[in-house]
Amino acid sequence: MAKNDNSALIPDEVIMKKIYMFRGSKVMLDRDLADLYEIENKQLKRAVRRNISRFPEDFMFELSTEEFNNLRSQFDTSNWGGTRYVPMVFTEHGVIMLASVLNSERAIQVNIQIVRIFTRMREILASHKELLLKLEKIAHKLAEHDDQILVIFEYLKKLEQAKHQLMEQQNRKRLGFKRMDEH
């Protein structure tokens, strides 16, 4: 059952809300992936543990207790039910590897969608970085222009002062000896 590019099993927004940042990487939680794959979380974890050599640290890691507590505090506690174990989190590469481990049609289709979302997010971040760099260059140029404009204003002030002094000198009453033709 091949899906075309326009059909989505799950709305992109739903998947995007399940992507978190931990240790400088965008990751997804095991329980969220299990929900998306429509399997039990313990089934997902069992498959990962059976194939643990496929999941190096940059593909999958378990949250520390502190990270888990921080994550839990962000959610309504009833959401977590009786979860006693810290979750596994999967980077984009780990999600790709999950498709080969789970090997179900649903996992493959969901993974394709997730990878496309990760790619789109990366492209958006890259375009934002380019825009930020351009804005930074513009701001730098404006700062340079501001300095140059200030120099021009200072020069204009000095010219105005010199003009004012010249006018004052020309308009002041002369002192001293006057020639007969100056009366």
Image: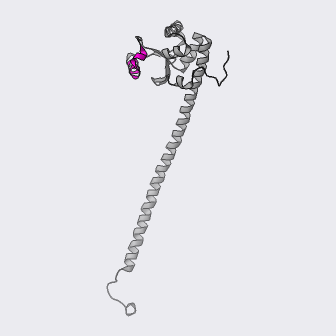
Q: Most extreme residue toward the front, as rendered? A: 78
Side of 162 relative to 113 (left or right): left
Query: Where are the magenta residues, as a range?
Result: 68-81
User: Residue 102, percent across and down?
Assistant: 57, 10
Q: Quadrant of the N terminus?
A: top right
Q: Position of residue 10 (x, y in %)?
A: 57, 21
Check if residue 76 falls in the magenta segment: yes
Residue 78 drawn at (x, y percent): 40, 16
Residue at image coords 38%, 80%? 171
Q: Quadrant of residue 115?
A: top right
Foreground pick, 174 / 92: 92
Position above or below: 25 against 164: above
Magenta span main SS = helix
Q: Is residue 57 visible?
A: no
Say if residue 135 shows up in the picture. Answer: yes
Across and down, in percent, residue 91 comes to 52, 20
Q: Is residue 174 shown above or below 138?
A: below
At horizontal 39% and vertical 17% (from top left) the residue drawn is 77
* Residue 166 covered by magenta stretch: no
- Identify which residue, 182 or 113, lies in the foreground: 113
